[in-house]
Image: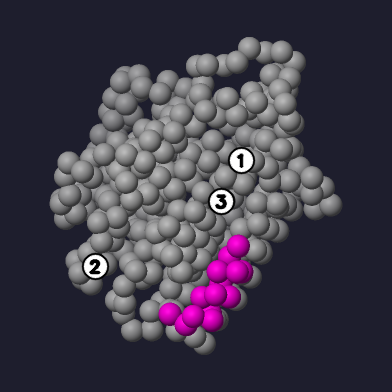
Amino acid sequence: MLSFIPNEYYSSVFYHIILVVVLFVFFGTYKTELTNSSSLKAKNGFGIVLMLFIILYMGFRPISIYFGDMVIYNRELQMYIDGAPFNSESDILFEAMKYFYAKYLNAQLFFFTCSFFYLYLLYLGTKKIFKDYWFYAFLMFIIAFTFWAYGVNGIRNGLATSLFVYGISKEKKVNTILILFCSYFIHSSMMIPIIAYLMTFLYSNTKVYIISWILLIPLSLAIGGFFESFFLGLGFGADKLDSYLGEFNQANEGVEISVGFRWDFLLYSASGIFAGWYYIFKKKFEDILYQKIFHIYLISNGLWILIIRANYSNRFAYLSWFILGLVLIYPLLKSELVKNQHVLIGKILIVYVGFTYLMNVILYKS
């Protein structure tokens, strides 16, 4: 346990570190070409070191109320230690993991394991998709403004989405679907991106998806309350979807409630819509996996727009935001689309980490 860092500064230290890392990478983009072999080799080595550092830093954080749901999970582990029966009604894979660690190991190793897979699955996924250029995509994941929160607070969500990323990196559809459904049994809210993934096989008109996303904004403004009631009435995911849309207990969730039509979050989401449109229609970038990722993002984010006023809107939006980094950078790591492409990647990294720093350090002072 890294107890020498005061709990109240633990998150801030992480944000300052990633800011320095991105600044270092950003200035480096002006010195070398993206395809420079020695630069790629150095970044690959640095990426592994960075991954290991974050796994250790996140995994051996103190068990503290400063990390929200971590305290809840620790209490549930203690209940298993004290003899509570296995809870088969919760997310079965994650619950089995808690039960095993409570019976045979300990809470600190449980949180370390969660952190390990949260990072390592992202590494495996980006390595598979981008080969030698994986570092940039991996960096986009860890500098996202939701990354830290879903590693230390919404732990189930974070672990499930990392497994999702790993799943879509697989070439065989059977392996992908099996892994995606495993992510569902870690956190059942993953039904939304999973359904979105399956929809990409049924319909692939990107222009229609974009137009639909745009039209959902005035629709939500006009009758958003109807959609919140509609999804609650369906009754699926009673412990997840219902709690996301209905009334919350802030103490149990350990995060700040976000209510109302979030124009700031909508603009953040729109950056991915613009990027996908630009790459596909302006630059004529063609890649089946990117198209699927973009469509998953459009479908999942569009559903969030319909219920944007719901409590914990940020948690629901995360079901699309977790792949926003891929939407923004994927084509730049796959094809030469613009002049000074390495510099453009550096600028995207700076803007992305800048938003993270603004939201988590300046505005909300993590």
* Residue at the disc numbered 3: 120
Q: Which residue in the rendered view is the most extreme toward the right? A: 4
- The spot of residue 309 in percent (x, y) is 39, 37
Q: Point out the frontmost of discs 3 and 2.
A: 3
In the image, 31: left or right of 21?
A: left
Please name the residue shown 46% across and 60% down the image.
127
Instruction: Classify mark 3: helix, strand or loop.
Output: helix
Give coordinates of residue 78: x percent, y percent.
73, 23
Would you say residue 47 sits in the magenta stretch?
Answer: yes
Disc on the earlier residue, 3 or 2 = 3
Q: Left or right? Give the position of 302 relative to 93.
A: left
- What is the distance, in whole Å, between disc 1 and disc 2 at their CAs? 36 Å
> Which residue is under mark 1?
114
Residue 285 marker:
2
Q: Write the residue at 54% across / 60% down.
A: 143
The residues bearing labels 3 and 2 have C-alpha atoms spaced at a distance of 29 Å
Mark 3 and mark 2 in contact? Answer it, CB < 8 Å. no
Q: What element carries label 2?
A: loop
Crowding around mark 3 (Cα neighbors within 10 Å: few <14, some 14 to 19, many 20+) is some
Q: Which amino acid does label 3 sit on?
A: Tyr
In the rendered image, which quarter is residue 303 located in? top left
In magenta, the rendered stretch is: 35-48
Q: Looking at the image, which residue is at 32% across and 19% down?
A: 233
Q: Which of marks 1 and 3 is in front?
A: 3
Q: How crowded is mark 1: few (under 14 residues within 10 Å), some or many (20 or more)?
A: many
